[in-house]
Amino acid sequence: MNLMVFGAPGAGKGTQAKFLVEKYNIPQISTGDMLRAAIADKTAMGMEAKKYMDEGELVPDSTIIGIIKDRLEEEDCKKGFILDGFPRTLNQAVALEELMKNSGKKLDKVLSFDVPDELIIQRIAGRRVCSKCGATFHIEFNKPKVQDICDYCGTALVTRKDDNVDTVKNRLENYHKQTAPLIDFYKKMGVFAQIDGSQELSLVTEDMFKNLA
Ligand code: AMP
């Protein structure tokens, strides 16, 4: 099964993707996590991407498409995958279609989490992420079992550098301008499913799985 979680930053894509990983045992492919790993490894690509990420701007399409192409060719993607945070521009969506076509694959479902901007800003202020596996928690709405420790890998949780109000506003603006137009693209493909991402977390998960039943 080839899935995509879609929505604004802070809409719950990463959190819900973890549930999909557990259920279907297919990898979550988060371009944000891959870029943060490249920054931690201090690679040339990571250092270049950091300049954009710190400002809440999108990393250039050519860089992102290159990363995704290599990742989708890996062995663990053969039985399916969950795209998280990719594509974010029409160019990226077209490149993905081309990659999928060339490898005889198709996208089964785009799960889109709809959350108003005011709630996103509120949610991101309390967001904590695992610096190792990228799992996302919230100090109020999605608490880890042990305070400040990742449920999945036991690593300390941190606040992302780009999770501050000014950067989030810029990320939201870029989402509306560059990423939201993809909704029509995927509606036309007949794979788009809209989910009310503003509900309590377990209800969002329930609605998500209903769309896959
Ligand atoms: P995320 O963890 O998905 O919120 O991504 C964090 C940041 O990484 C974004 O604000 C962008 O700067 C960059 N990024 C992640 N995925 C993409 C993408 N598909 N296209 C461009 N930039 C991206």
Image (tube, rainbow, N blue to C red):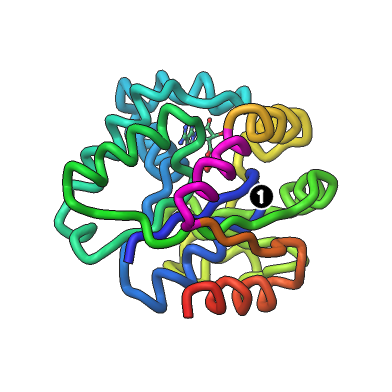
Which contiguous range is marked in magenta?
179-191
Magenta-span inclusion, residue 169: no
Q: Which residue is mark 1?
A: 10
Depth order, front residue of 89/25: 89
User: Which amino acid, mark 1?
Assistant: Gly
Q: Considering only vertical position in the picture, is 116 above or below 96? A: below
Compared across the picture, whether 203 is left or right of 117 comes to left
Nearer to us in this view, 156 or 174: 174
Residue 88 pos. (x, y %): 51, 36
Residue 92 place in picture, x, y as percent: 41, 32
Viewer-closest of 17 and 103 = 103
Residue 44: x %, y % from top left: 31, 20
Q: Main secondary structure of the magenta part?
A: helix
Where does the image place residue 148, in percent across and percent down from the top left? 62, 63
Q: Could you tell whether 116 is left or right of 47 in the image?
A: right
Q: What residue is shown at x 69% (from left), y 77% (from top)? A: 203
Total numbered circles: 1
Q: Is residue 44 left or right of residue 126?
A: left
Q: Residue at x 54, y 50 (%)?
A: 187
| Quadrant of the image containing the N terminus | bottom left
Instruction: Answer with the quarter of the image where residue 91 lies.
Output: top left
Q: Residue at x 48, y 50 (%)?
A: 131
Residue 139 versus residue 188 in the image, above or below: below
* Horizontal relation, residue 170 to residue 40: left or right: right
Q: Residue at x 48, y 30 (%)?
A: 90
Instruction: Pick whichever, 36 or 119, lies toward us.
Output: 119
Image quadrant assignment for residue 36? top left
Visible in this render: residue 96? Answer: yes
Ligand 1 within 8 angstroms of badge 1 C-beta: yes
